[in-house]
Image (cartoon, rainbow, N blue to C red):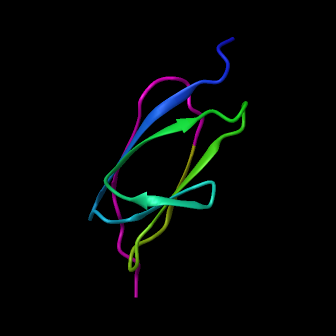
Amino acid sequence: EKAGQASRCLILTVPADAEIYIDNKKSGKSPILFTLVRNADSPRIITIKKLGYLTVEKEVIPDGDVIRINLNLEAERK
């Protein structure tokens, strides 16, 4: 079993400039490239927020491969 793995993680959103949170910690704005470290077998939670758009949450488990998230954000219904 490969332990202590990390993945490069690339997040692209349309529109850009969405706020990216990793496990509820603000990590920057899209587009963003960072290294996500594995936390045993617990998924890391990536939350993508932008004012006026629906929030997207993804669970990922870094496994050494590149994680790419390409999102077209969906506008909130008024």
Q: Is residue 68 above or below residue 4?
A: below
Q: Nearer the viewer, residue 50 or 25?
A: 25
* Residue located 66% across and 40% down the image: 43
* Magenta stretch in the rendered image: 60-78
- Where residue 27 sits: x, y (%)? 49, 57
Q: Is residue 29 magenta?
A: no
18 to the left or right of 39: left
Q: Residue 45's x, y, as percent?
A: 60, 50
Image x and y of residue 59, in percent: 59, 45
Q: Quadrant of the N terminus?
A: top right
**The magenta stretch spans residue 62:** yes
Q: Residue at x 28, y 62 (%)?
A: 16
* Residue 26, x across and y down, in percent: 53, 62
Tell me which secondary structure the magenta stretch mostly adopts: loop
Given the current orientation, which residue lies at the most extreme top position?
Answer: 1
Please name whichever residue, 5 or 43, is drawn nearer the observer in this view of the structure.
5
Horizontally, residue 23 falls left or right of residue 69, namely right
Q: Quadrant of the C terminus?
A: bottom left
Name above or below for residue 14 compared with residue 43: below
At x 38%, y 80%, the residue is: 52
Q: Examine the rendered structure and indicate whether residue 37 appears above or below residue 50.
A: above
- Vertical placement of residue 5 versus 20, above or below: above
Comparing 15 with 20, the one in front is 20
Q: Extreme left residue here?
A: 15
Q: Residue at x 43, y 60 (%)?
A: 28
